Amino acid sequence: MRKKKWKNLKEAAIKAFFFTCGILAILVLLGIFLTLLSTAIPAFREIKISEFLTSTHWDPTSPEKAEYGLLSMIVSTLMVTAGAMLLAVPIGIGVSAYLSDVAHWRVREILKPVIEILAGIPSVVVGFLGLVLFGPAIAKIFHTGNGLNAVNGSVLLAIMSLPTIISISEDSLNAVPRAYSEASLALGASHWQTLLRVKLPAALSGIIAACMLGMGRAIGETMTVLMATGNARAFPHGFLDSVRTMTANIAIELGEVPYFTTHYYALFAIGLVLFIMTFAVNLAADVVLRKYQEREQ
Amino acid sequence: MKKTIVIIALSLALLGSLLLAAPARKMIQIKGSDTMVNLVQILAEEYMGKTPGAAIAVLGGGSGTGITGLINKTCDIADHSREWKQKEIDQAWEKGVTPKFFVVAVDGLSIIVNDKNPIEQLTIAQVGALYRGDIKNWKALGDYQKPVSLYGRQSNSGTYVFMQEFVLGNKNYSADMKEMNGNAQIIEGILQDEGAVGYVGVGYLYDENRQIRKGLKVLKISKEPNGTGYLPTDKTAVDSGAYPVSRPLFMATNGKPKADVAQFLTWIVGPEGQAIVEREGFFTIGEGKYKAANDKSFK
């Protein structure tokens, strides 16, 4: 009798433990969001929201007049991310299609882990490559004098988001039921036609989710762009201009900002904007992925 | 099952007691100026080699970062290549931190270009105009048809603030300036960019053989148009103030330095430390006003 009671208690304790673990992530996320919100809002006591979102001049430590305009940085972030996706999505889908359908299993066994290792390279190392390797190469190709610009950032972020895109796309291609491709082949379609017209459409939502997750990674990346894009504050007029992303700006200025000043609050406001952007992207990825899983069942 | 639990518990207890019993070796934490980080690292290494039991950790991050660190009591010594702003001193006092300043070396802030650039000498005003973005092409200054590409530091850098105050005349930097993460990155950029101009601490000009790095050109700077220009590597010009952009490099402590921190600082401003300062390409503090100021801070 006593033994049974003890057992019940143990059961309840274990249950409670796992429940806490599960809810912890939500609590942390909520905590971060609330902190971000409460530290960002005081910024707008002195900065007009319209100025914050539409002015292109950012210079909070200016000896002339402190200015808080975020637009250049929003555009820079979007440019670098879009550039990265432009490079990474076609390559990523191509590689995952190759891995799942074309490659010999031995090649796949080697290639997939190698691609996953790529995800483990520290971002400073990638940034340094941008500084000393891609930068000079880009300068030579485009005759720009230097390679510290949005193109460089895009290339590096593409490299960094590729493992995510390839890995998840390949999983979703593999999850397409065998019957689909077998039916297609039996009807006389070639391998290429089967891949392009049957498997890719069937796995499309998984592939879209993969790209979204890769994009989330690219938007939030800091060190790499900080090192490789030159960080000029001017509004970018093209991919060959030096750009400063929101993440880079926070990293540059948060270390020395006097606490509880408008500048300090403004940096958190940038963080909030960034959070909303990545949240939107991740949410979209989640919705798409869910749709895909529903269809699977 | 019971056995395993006992073993785990025992080993945890053992680990805990080991951690507690480990000698509490006090590490001196130094943070701040990126211009000084290499120099201070070498000073710390030599000092630790000579002094058994000394433990010093040196971090960069920029003068602003070091100063904020000292105010928030996350480091024992702050390196800074600019003076403290009034705001920072006020903040320190509010938190009960009373900074004491020591000049440990003198830097000739060097204006550098790619060695393809034919220009040899600029006035202070011309450098200011370049960095404010008033001059967009090198042809305005000499026989060189190339757009100017500005390299500078980020706002947490003491060098950034120093330039803005003494060279730009407290005006905004051009928004087109590329803001690099440190002296070394500015040099990397300039080596590859034929239209580049940048500013770095004099200690960063040299390669491992104590020669000016290949591909760089250090500009002579004059105060007046047509005046005599001087190089930041010229010790007499920097000492006499004839080189117009030289500056003291500081270390700050919270209150009068005590025990091992005091020992380390005394060693740096002493003959041994100053010999290393000179070897690394910076200039010594000499016997004049800096030494007098240091002596006051030690008391």
Image (cartoon, coloured by chain):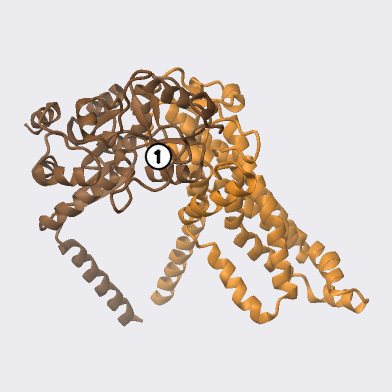
Rendering coords of residue B29 (x, y %): 23, 47
Q: Is B201 left, or right, of A182 in this rendering?
A: left
Rendering coords of residue A202 (x, y %): 80, 64
Mark 1 Cα within 10 Å, few/some/many (few <14, many 20+)?
many
* Amino acid marked by disc 1: Lys
Disc 1 is placed on an element classified as strand
Rendering coords of residue B147 (x, y %): 56, 32
Q: Is B161 left, or right, of A159 in this rendering?
A: left
Q: Decide which of A133, A262 is in the foreground and name it.
A: A133
Report the residue at 72% width, 64% height from top.
A94
Q: Decide which of A134, B22 is in the foreground and name it.
A: A134
Chain containing the residue with disc 1: B
Image quarter where the N terminus of chain B lies is: bottom left
Report the residue at 60% width, 48% height from top.
A140
Q: How many marks?
A: 1
Q: Decide which of B185, A1 is in the foreground and name it.
A: B185
Q: Is A58 left, or right, of B28 in this rendering?
A: right
Report the residue at 66% width, 47% height from top.
A83
Rendering coords of residue B46 (x, y %): 17, 53
- Asked if A157 appears above or below A11 in the picture, the reply is above
User: What hue does chain A carry in this figure?
Assistant: orange
Check disc 1 and report the residue beneath it: B217
User: What hue does chain B carry in this figure?
Assistant: brown
